[in-house]
Image: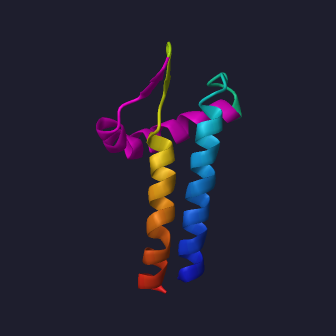
Amino acid sequence: MCSLLILFFRFFSYALFAWIILSWVQVSPEHPIGQLKIILDRAFTRILEPIRSRIPTLRIGMAGLDLSPLVLIFGVNLIQPYVLRAVC
């Protein structure tokens, strides 16, 4: 059970990192990577919406920097040891 939970946290972190990288790249929706991007968009948009509603976008000149993925990474890394200790 513990190894499955560790695998879940690792997969979640890798998927979030892939979503962040893919958000910077324009890919055709017909391309397999574009389809992966659509799937990750749907999943992480639902997870990040509550965070985005509480943390404003950081404005740098004309550009905006969304800090919600960074907060999610920090939060997951913060709760992971406690969850593993409670389950394992």
Q: Is residue 37 above or below residue 27?
A: below
Residue lying farthest to the bottom in this orientation? 88
Which residues are the magenta region? 33-60
Residue lying farthest to the front in this orientation? 61
Report x, y in % for residue 5: 53, 73
The coloring applied to the image is rainbow
> Does the rendering let one see residue 9?
yes
Residue at left 58%, top 72%?
6
Report x, y in % for residue 4: 57, 75
Residue at left 44%, top 58%?
75
Report x, y in % for residue 24: 63, 28
State the image quarter where residue 8 is shown: bottom right
Give the tally of numbered discs: 0
Residue at left 66%, top 21%?
28
Q: What secondary structure is the magenta-colored segment mainly?
A: helix
**82 sits to left or right of 15:** left
Q: Is residue 45 magenta?
A: yes
Q: Is residue 57 magenta?
A: yes
In the image, 74 versus 84, the foreground residue is: 74
Report x, y in % for residue 44: 46, 43
State the image quarter where residue 59 is shown: top left
In the image, 39 versus 14, the foreground residue is: 14
> Does the rendering let one see residue 36?
no
Residue at left 47%, top 32%?
66
**19 sits to left or right of 42:** right
In the image, 69 versus 33, the foreground residue is: 69
